[in-house]
Image (tube, rainbow, N blue to C red):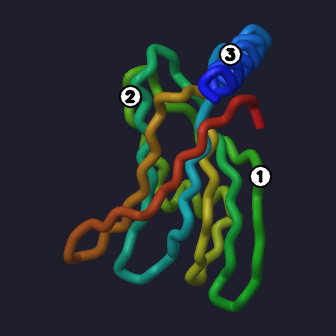
């Protein structure tokens, strides 16, 4: 019985070593940039102002692009893709105002609910969204996804 178990262990070890010899260790993927999803912002809301902040800790200025989808208060839906919001300086912070976002959408005047995908080349960039009312500021949820290739 002991010899049988010993033989089985040897077989498993040999199979294990054979498996290890064929294992290829790949380098981690190179990250091209980031995509931040701002899940929901209300624009043209009476008494409120919303904006985005883009923080760039890198040593290069980076372009800021976005895809925007929206629904107006009357139910009209729309979208724009690959909107250029300018750039964020190396080691700098850029503000994308509510007015800038509305301009990219064609300047609707009624209440509008938007969702944005902000796309930036550079893996260290941070995007935050905020809303301000007379009684203070509130953060707006953003979700970060790393991009391996340019979208």
- Relative side of 106 to 41, left or right: right
Figure check: 59 above or below 120: above
Separation of residues labelled 2 and 3 (CA atoms): 60 Å
Could you say which quadrant of the image residue 10 lies in? top right
Marking on residue 10:
3
Q: Nearer the viewer, mark 2 or mark 3?
A: 3
Q: Nearer the viewer, residue 73 or 31?
A: 31
Q: Percent from the top left, x then y, of residue 20?
A: 71, 14
Circle 1 SS class: strand
* Spatial separation of the CA atoms under disc 3 and disc 1: 60 Å
Relative to 72, residue 11 above or below: above
Q: CA distance from mark 1 to mark 2?
A: 25 Å
Query: Can you tell which mark lies on residue 92?
Result: 2
Which sits earlier in the primary sequence, circle 1 or circle 2?
Answer: 1
- Going from N to C along the chain, the mark reached first, 3 or 1, is 3
- Residue 67 place in picture, x, y as percent: 70, 53
Label 3, secondary structure: give it: helix
Residue at horizontal 67 percent and vertical 56 percent from the top: 104
Q: Up-down: is 108 above or below 32?
A: below
In the picture, which quadrant includes the C terminus? Answer: top right
| Residue at image location 76% in from the left, 77% down from the top | 77
Horizontally, is 94 left or right of 105 in the view? left
Tell me whether the residue at label 3 lies in contact with that at label 1, contact meaning CB atoms closer than 8 angstroms: no
Q: Which residue bears the numbered disc 1? A: 81
- On screen, residue 110 versus residue 105, left or right, reads left
| Lower position in the chain sequence, tag 2 or tag 3 | 3
Question: Dot 1 surroundings within 10 Å: few (below 14), some, or many (20 or more)?
Answer: few
Element class at badge 2: loop
Image coords of residue 150 (percent x, y): 75, 31
User: Is residue 90 among what the camera can see?
Assistant: yes
Tell me where residue 129 appears, x and y as whole percent.
Answer: 43, 56
Query: Looking at the image, which residue is at 38% across and 61% down?
Result: 130
């Amino acid at each position: 019985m002991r010899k049988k178990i010993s033989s089985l262990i040897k077989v498993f070890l040999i199979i294990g070593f054979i498996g290890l010899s064929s294992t290829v260790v790949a380098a981690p993927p190179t990250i091209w940039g980031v995509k931040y999803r701002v899940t929901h912002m209300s624009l043209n809301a009476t008494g409120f102002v919303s904006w985005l902040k883009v923080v760039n800790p890198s040593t290069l200025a980076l372009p800021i692009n976005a895809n925007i989808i929206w629904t107006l208060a009357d139910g009209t839906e729309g979208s724009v893709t690959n909107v250029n919001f300018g750039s964020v300086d190396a080691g700098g912070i850029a503000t994308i105002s509510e007015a800038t976002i509305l301009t990219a959408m064609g300047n609707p005047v009624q209440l509008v609910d938007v969702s944005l995908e902000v796309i930036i080349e550079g893996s260290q960039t941070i995007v935050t969204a905020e809303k301000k009312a007379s009684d203070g500021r509130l953060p707006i949820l953003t979700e970060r996804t790393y991009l391996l290739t340019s979208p």
